[in-house]
């Protein structure tokens, strides 16, 4: 049995594959004795086709998944000559490359996480009449997924409210939630804090601005750092481009504070992100779907600050879904100020009934079986049946 994964454009379009790969392998072990012979059921081969980066290659290498680069054109949301070059040259070349690579693999099903990097491979799969499963993590679909949904055999969605935005493909929709990285029992909250170098019995604020960081959040946090560090520890994911500037300012601000070691700035977190999530007592975050799924999984009381200019305003709509469920506090980026950020953080750390309410309500937005439910859809498609 052969499965092709595709996607790319941001970390959110690739990271969920970590748990999906594990779920596909588990599902194969459970079902291979009942799979039809034409699928070559004794073997499972998984490949990734899409726009590659060193980080993407390394991620799939950890899971023993071969990676093959397929170029693609990016549709920018602003006027740019690069868009014309991408659409007229890169995308057609990408489709030709995808057709060649797909023909050599000839998978039984293709799984797409969206992003511009998925377009050539999904189109190639459609041309070869290979079943396609699209997954849409956000409340509203991204541009790539929106344009490709008509080619999909089935579409899994991360939010129930997405059905309101997709009436034309309603019969293809399956609510699975968004897969998150495997979070086992290797850490307790106290042991995770100890691993990260924080006191076990002090509240820990996790600040994450997405894979590229968030200048607006970083600057507001620095302005209130002398106050909040007196009441909690802070683990601040700054983003790689802003790490040096932010940590330099933070060290100057806290130079004479007896609690200066309770602030830690990091450019990003790879494998240690799991321990950071387990350790967090509260979080300030953007509203990317993967981050929200992890917040829901670990019941972290959170203050969400959606990215103001996200594509299709998807982060604001993700945040509104959490707000409507009473699962998080929301701070509109147009209103973000040091004072309001401090007010929200202090409210989360001190208002015990609020924290309990948020933790209870966010359970409704957690889908612990997301990866395995997606794997089951993939295997149903591979056997030639449209899931119902």
Image (cartoon, grey):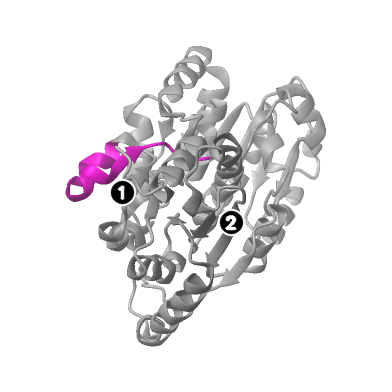
| Residue 176 is one of the magenta-drawn residues | yes
Check whether the beta carbons of the residues at disc 1 and disc 2 lie within 8 A of each other: no
Q: Give whichever of discs 1 and 2 has the lower sequence position.
A: 2
Q: Which mark is residue 105?
A: none
Whether residue 28 is situated above or below residue 39 in the rendered picture: above
Which label sits in the foreground, 1 or 2? 2
Q: Is residue 352 left or right of residue 56?
A: left
Q: Residue at x 81, y 29 (%)?
A: 194
Q: Residue at x 39, y 83 (%)?
A: 92
Residues at marks 1 and 2, CA–CA distance in whole angstroms? 28 Å
**Which quadrant does the C terminus fall into?**
top left
Q: Secondary structure at mark 2?
A: strand
Badge 1 density bin: few <14, some 14–19, many ≥20, Cα 10 Å: many
Residue at numbered disc 2: 46
Residue 170 spot, x, y in % from top left: 21, 43
Residue 350 spot, x, y in % from top left: 56, 18
| Residue 165 is one of the magenta-drawn residues | yes
In this view, the residue in front, 213 or 381, is: 381
Residue at numbered disc 1: 140
Q: Secondary structure at mark 1?
A: loop
Q: What is the tally of numbered marks visible in this picture?
A: 2
Badge 2 density bin: few <14, some 14–19, many ≥20, Cα 10 Å: many
Question: What range is drawn magenta here?
Answer: 161-179
Q: Is residue 358 left or right of residue 212?
A: left
User: Residue 246 appears in which quarter of the rendering?
Assistant: bottom right
Residue 256 spot, x, y in % from top left: 81, 41
């Amino acid at each position: 049995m052969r499965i092709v994964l595709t996607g790319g454009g941001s970390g959110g379009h690739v990271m969920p594959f970590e748990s999906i790969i594990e779920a596909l392998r588990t599902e194969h072990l459970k079902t291979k004795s009942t799979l039809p012979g034409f699928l070559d059921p004794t073997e499972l081969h998984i490949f990734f086709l899409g726009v590659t980066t060193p980080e993407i290659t390394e991620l799939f290498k950890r899971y023993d998944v071969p990676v093959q680069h397929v170029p693609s054109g990016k549709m920018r949301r602003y006027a740019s000559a690069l868009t014309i070059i991408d659409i007229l040259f890169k995308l057609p070349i990408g489709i030709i490359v995808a057709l060649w690579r797909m023909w050599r693999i000839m998978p039984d099903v293709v799984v797409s996480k969206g992003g511009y990097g998925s377009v050539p491979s999904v189109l190639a799969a459609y041309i070869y009449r290979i079943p396609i499963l699209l997954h849409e993590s956000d409340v509203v679909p991204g541009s790539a997924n929106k344009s490709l949904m008509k080619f999909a055999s089935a579409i899994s969605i991360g939010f129930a409210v997405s059905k309101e935005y997709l009436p034309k493909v309603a019969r293809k929709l399956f609510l699975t939630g968004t897969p998150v990285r495997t979070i086992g029992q290797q850490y307790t909250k106290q042991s995770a804090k100890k691993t990260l170098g924080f006191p076990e019995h002090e509240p820990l604020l996790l600040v994450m601005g997405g894979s590229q960081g968030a200048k607006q959040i970083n600057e507001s946090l620095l302005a209130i750092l002398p106050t909040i560090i007196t009441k909690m520890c802070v683990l601040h994911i700054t983003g790689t481009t802003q790490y040096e500037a932010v940590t330099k300012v933070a060290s100057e601000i806290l130079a004479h504070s007896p609690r200066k070691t309770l602030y830690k700035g990091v450019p990003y977190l790879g494998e240690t992100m799991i321990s950071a999530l387990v350790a967090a007592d509260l979080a300030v975050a953007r509203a990317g779907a993967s981050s929200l799924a992890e917040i829901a999984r670990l019941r972290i009381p959170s203050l969400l600050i959606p990215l103001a200019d996200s594509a299709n305003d998807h982060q604001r709509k993700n945040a509104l879904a959490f707000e409507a469920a009473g699962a998080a506090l929301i701070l509109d980026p147009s209103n973000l100020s040091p004072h309001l950020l401090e007010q929200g953080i202090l409210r989360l750390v001190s208002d015990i009934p609020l924290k309990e309410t948020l933790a209870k309500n966010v359970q409704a937005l957690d889908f612990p079986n997301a990866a395995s439910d997606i794997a089951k859809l993939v295997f149903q498609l591979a056997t030639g049946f449209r899931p119902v």
